[in-house]
Image (cartoon, helix red, strand yellow):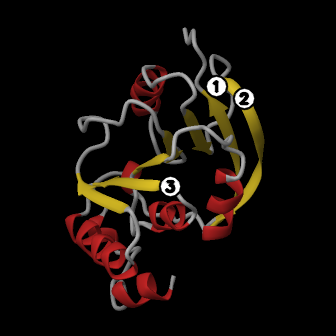
Amino acid sequence: MRALKREFAGVDLHDPSRVGSESRIFGETPVLTVVKLLGVVEEGGPRQLLDLGSGRGTVVLAAAACGFTGLGLELEADWVARAQRVAKRLDLPAEFRCADFLEEDWPAAAVVFVVATAFPEEVRAEILERVRRLQPGSYLIAGDWPGLHSLDLVWQGPLPVDWGVIPFSVYRIGEHMP
C-alpha cells in the first residue's frame, strides 16, 4: 500500500472543511481487516466487491489484490482520481467512480462492503433495500451495523479500523429475502 500512501501524501484526510455532514466522516478499514472479511466469503460466491463510500480506496484495492474485481463509489472527486491512478499503477482490477452510492447502479451480484458508523437510519434502510435486491449468493459485509436479522448471518466479530475496533458482520443473501 506504499503506492496509496505516496498518492495521498500531503492530503489532510481529516480536514473538517471537506465534511458536509457527519455521514461523510472519513475512516479507513485496514488491509488485514479486509483480508479477514473477504476470507469469509465462500468459494463460488461473487468475485465483484462494491465498496459504498470507498474513501482512498483501500478496501477496493485490497480486494482487487485478493482476486476480486473492485468497484468503489465515493463522493470526493479528488480521492476517486487518486485511487484510480493507484489501481492503474498497480495494474489491479479496480474502478473508482465519483458517485452517490444510493443513486448509482449496483452490480446484480456482489460482495457489498459498508461501514455504517456515521450513516443515519434512513440511509441504512435504503442500503438494506438495495442489498435485498441483489442476486442470491451475494454478500453484505457490514461494519458497525449488527442485527440485520432478515439476512443470513455467516460470521460476526470485532475487527480493527483506524479509529479503534468495531463489530463486523458478514451476511449472505438468500433466495427469499423479506
Instruction: State the residue at coordinates (63%, 16%).
Output: 150
The kind of residue on which mark 2 rests is Leu
Instruction: State the residue at coordinates (42%, 20%).
Output: 133
Is 7 situated left or right of 128 in this image?
left
The kind of residue on which mark 1 rests is Leu
The answer to whether residue 102 shows anywhere in this view is: yes
Callout 2: few (<14), some (14-19), or many (20+) C-alpha neighbours within 10 Å? some
Check the image and report above or below for 174 versus 138. Answer: above
Q: Nearer the viewer, mark 1 or mark 2?
A: 2
Q: Helix or strand or loop: what does disc 1 sit on?
A: loop
> Where does the image place residue 14, in percent across and percent down from the top left?
41, 73
- Asked whether the residues under the numbered discs 1 and 2 touch, taking CB atoms below 8 Å apart as contact, a structural biologist would say yes
Instruction: State the residue at coordinates (72%, 29%).
Output: 153
Instruction: State the residue at coordinates (63%, 45%).
Output: 144
Q: Helix or strand or loop: what does disc 2 sit on?
A: strand
Check disc 1 and report the residue beneath it: 148
Distance (Cα) linking label 3 and label 1: 25 Å
Distance (Cα) linking label 1 and label 2: 8 Å
> Where does the image place residue 171, in percent across and percent down from the top left?
65, 32
Check disc 3 and report the residue beneath it: 68
Q: In the rendered picture of this protein, how many numbered marks are placed on residues?
A: 3
Say whether disc 3 or disc 1 marks the residue closer to the N-terminus: 3
Q: Nearer the viewer, mark 3 or mark 1?
A: 3
The answer to whether residue 115 shows anywhere in this view is: no
The kind of residue on which mark 3 rests is Phe
Is 120 situated left or right of 41 in this image?
left
> Toward which corner of the image does residue 126 lie, by quadrant?
top left
Which is more toward the observer, 166 or 50?
Answer: 50
Say whether disc 1 or disc 2 marks the residue closer to the N-terminus: 1
Check disc 2 and report the residue beneath it: 153
Check the image and report above or below for 124 versus 16. Answer: above
